[in-house]
């Protein structure tokens, strides 16, 4: 059984396997061309287990995201906060779970907030978790990134070895200065061939 508006794919409701889904809009800043979130949401209602329902929300080429509030007849409750490229899972405790139209997970909030800035020069992260480090590198919208740099989380590029690149309002070309290939971007290539006849 599902509820929808006229002309939309049913995506809120429950199925015969005891899976129920409610969705609410969140406002990620990484939307892209991909699978519409209504199609992703509809797939959840075809799931037979909570794990299948959660996996359905994380399809690779999703265009954007919702918050998926997923409940199972066993009492399991999950909030899957999704954007086009990232997600976070919030577990229900003590038999209830509440969500509104903004991210609750600190990871989703942090990258969303950082990427809202109109500038993108540097960003830093301190973490011992490889998955968190990879997620940071994949999602942060800045030209220079540092992880676990004790001498300064967002400062101290090494000229000649590390390009210093700004994104968005911090740079106009996306090409870094001071790196090993910096001068080459201003040069032009010319192939020269001389044929001598004897």
Image (cartoon, rainbow, N blue to C red):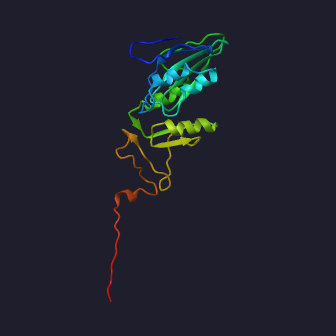
Viewer-nearest residue: 17 or 158: 17
Is residue 118 left or right of 133 when viewed as pictured? left
Residue 139 visible in image: yes
Q: Position of residue 52 (x, y in %)?
A: 61, 24
Whether 170 is drawn above or below 178: the answer is above
Whether 163 is drawn above or below 62: the answer is below
Viewer-nearest residue: 99 or 68: 68
Is residue 182 left or right of 157 when viewed as pictured? left
Looking at the figure, which quarter contains the C terminus?
A: bottom left
Quarter of the image where one finds residue 184: bottom left
Whether 112 is drawn above or below 73: the answer is below
Quarter of the image where one finds residue 107: top right
Whether 27 is drawn above or below 193: the answer is above
- Residue at 34 percent across and 44 percent down: it is 172
Q: Position of residue 96 (x, y in %)?
A: 61, 10
Viewer-nearest residue: 170 or 136: 136
Q: Position of residue 5 (x, y in %)?
A: 41, 12
Q: Position of residue 77 (x, y in %)?
A: 62, 15
- Residue at 48 percent across and 34 percent down: it is 61
Residue 126 visible in image: no
Instruction: Work out which residue is located at the far bottom of the displayed protein and give it.
Output: 198
Quarter of the image where one finds residue 170: top left
């Amino acid at each position: 059984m599902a509820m929808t508006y006229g002309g939309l794919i049913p995506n809120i409701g429950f199925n015969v396997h005891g899976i129920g889904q409610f969705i609410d809009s969140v406002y990620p800043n990484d939307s892209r061309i991909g699978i519409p979130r209504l199609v992703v949401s509809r797939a959840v209602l075809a799931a037979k287990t909570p794990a299948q329902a959660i996996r359905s929300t994380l399809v690779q080429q999703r265009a954007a995201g919702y918050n998926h509030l997923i409940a199972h007849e066993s009492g399991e409750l999950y909030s899957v906060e999704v954007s086009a490229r990232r997600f976070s899972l919030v577990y229900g405790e003590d038999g209830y779970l509440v969500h509104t139209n903004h991210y609750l997970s600190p990871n989703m909030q942090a990258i969303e907030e950082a990427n809202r800035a109109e500038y993108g020069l540097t960003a830093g992260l301190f973490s011992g978790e490889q998955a968190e480090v990879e997620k940071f590198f994949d999602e942060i919208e800045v030209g220079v990134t540092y992880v676990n740099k004790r001498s300064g989380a967002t400062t101290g590029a090494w000229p000649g070895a590390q390009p210093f690149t700004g994104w968005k309002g911090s740079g106009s070309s996306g090409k870094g200065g001071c790196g090993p290939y910096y001068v080459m971007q201003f040069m032009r290539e010319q192939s020269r061939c001389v044929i001598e006849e004897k």
